[in-house]
Image (cartoon, rainbow, N blue to C red):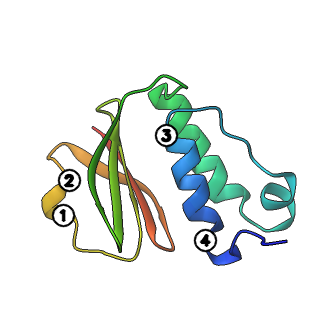
């Protein structure tokens, strides 16, 4: 078996909880791994912004060290180790969640 790398789990949740689809949260991650607060924050963003299975996705940039996408014109998510993305984020967005190699912005 090839388990998902434990240091990338929150990047995975940042992706599935901000992108179109029907996400699933693993019980162990939520209750046993100490990720409840971070996962809750991402679930709240998804709910507040009305992200659903048919939400519109626009990939802003995709490179070896960066994935940046906008969802429904209301949420932007960054995955990967690159930090110099300020020039790619439109005005009117603020960071509302961040962690190891991920960040999420919401339109103000």
Nearest to viewer (mark 2 / mark 3): 3
Residue indicated by mark 1:
86
Q: How far apart are marks 2 and 1 (CA)?
A: 5 Å
Name the residue at 57% across, 43% down: 17
Of 5 and 37, nearer the camera is: 5
Name the residue at 65% across, 48% down: 40
Could you tell me which secondary element the residue under label 2 belongs to? loop
Q: Distance between the residues labelled 1 and 4?
A: 23 Å
Which sits earlier in the primary sequence, circle 1 or circle 3? 3
Q: Is the residue under label 1 in contact with that under label 2 (CB below 8 Å)?
A: yes
Q: Is the residue under label 4 in contact with that under label 1 (CB below 8 Å)?
A: no
Can you say which quadrant of the picture contains the N terminus? bottom right
Q: How far apart are marks 2 and 3 (CA)?
A: 17 Å
Q: Distance between the residues labelled 3 and 4?
A: 17 Å
Which sits earlier in the primary sequence, circle 4 or circle 2? 4
Could you tell me which secondary element the residue under label 3 belongs to? loop
Numbered tag placed on residue 89 in the rendering? 2
Q: Give the mark count.
A: 4
Q: How far apart are marks 1 and 3 (CA)?
A: 21 Å
Could you tell me which secondary element the residue under label 1 belongs to? helix
Which sits earlier in the primary sequence, circle 3 or circle 4? 4
């Amino acid at each position: 078996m090839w388990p998902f790398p434990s240091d990338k789990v929150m990047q995975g949740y940042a992706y599935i909880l901000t992108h179109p689809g029907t996400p699933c949260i693993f019980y162990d991650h939520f209750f046993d791994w100490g990720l409840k607060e971070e996962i809750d924050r991402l679930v709240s963003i998804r709910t507040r912004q009305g992200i659903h299975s048919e939400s519109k996705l626009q990939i802003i940039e995709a490179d070896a060290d960066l994935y940046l996408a906008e969802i429904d014109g209301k949420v932007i998510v960054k995955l990967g180790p690159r930090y110099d993305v300020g020039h790619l984020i439109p005005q009117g967005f603020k960071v509302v969640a961040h962690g190891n190699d991920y960040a999420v912005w919401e339109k103000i």
